Amino acid sequence: MKGFDPKFRDFPDYIIGITREIWEDRGIHTLHDYYAPEIVVRSPSSVVVGNRGVIAATMATLHEFPDRTLLGEDVIWSGDPETGMLSSHRLFSTATHAGDGVYGTATGTQLRYRILADCHARENRIDDEWLIRDQGAIVRQMGWEPRAYAADLIAREGGPDACVRPLTPHTDRAGPYRGTGNDHETGQRLEQILRRIMAADMATIPREYDRAVQAEYPGGVTAHGHGAVDRFWMGLRASFPDAAFDIDHRIGRADPDMPPRAAIRWSLHGQHTGWGVFGPPTGAEVYVLGITHAEFGPWGLRREWTLYDETAVWKQILLATS
């Protein structure tokens, strides 16, 4: 861990440790130490540039959810301390909606949802980030459907001309990280599975997935078996049948006491031209940022976690058709 604080025994310990220090231990000021001044943080809902913006967003979130916990489930990583390391961090979060904020007037709702975050770190600092919260799970637990929430958010942000623009290739900002991950066979295996599914080879699922697969999908959905996996991926791809599917980052790992596992950051970019999980085709141009984690066993892919932000997709559709 050359260049990193010696209190961290390895890179996963660094990622999990600073997350707890910032959020649960209220060390918000440590963002000055752990985040680079010009960091780029991309979420499907927005792009934030600079540490000051990150600190402001962190304080606003903790005002709205003061008891928020971030339980680190896994860190799948690549790179080295000399050139920089990329972590794909999977978290399970609990929180109570106890303050007014971006989700509206405080409701007292107790929430459970997942987060997937890719972070690039060098010299004890994170300088590039891609972050996906399960917004579909959050808003549904508050009594909203994602489309209705997106429409209300546009109105609260001042209407279509004034609202915060979601992440797209037009709103993205280049950061310092240019890596694409590693060449480990498990990452390559997951990449090929996703590429074949996105090429409409749905027979890939019974070939490559364990029959007893457990999958965690947007909206807080826990699903089991080949049929559930097929329905999820079919519903997404059917909405954007002609959209370009790209693999932006790929990591595979085989670590002691862990199954072979992989993390893929991917994107879909194109028009909403099909009937799928986003209703009647609108022709809207949509960009979907997604992250998938997977664990493999003797009978194939046995656990999958995939997230994209349903509310950000609906916001793009509504802005294009308002």
Image (cartoon, helix red, strand yellow):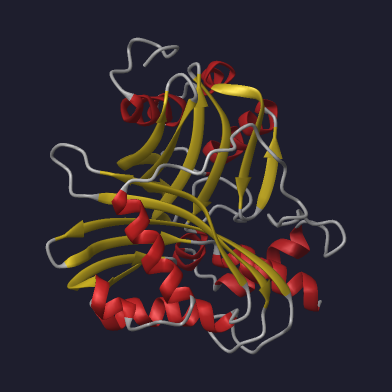
Q: Image point 71% across, 74% down: which residue?
A: 317
Q: Is residue 224 visible from the viewing direction of this image?
A: no
Asked whether, in this view, residue 60 is left or right of residue 1, the answer is right
Q: Position of residue 51 (x, y in %)?
A: 65, 27
Quarter of the image where one finds residue 112: bottom left
Establish if 203 lies above or below 49: below
**Front position in the image: 43 or 143:** 43
Count of numbered circles on the image: 0
Q: Position of residue 233 (x, y in %)?
A: 43, 76
State which quarter of the image contains the N terminus. Answer: top left
Establish if 8 lies above or below 205: above
**Front position in the image: 226 or 179:** 179
Asked whether, in this view, residue 55 is left or right of residue 140, the answer is right
**Front position in the image: 19 or 68:** 19
Q: Position of residue 260 (x, y in %)?
A: 22, 50
Establish if 305 lies above or below 231: above
Quarter of the image where one finds residue 320: bottom right
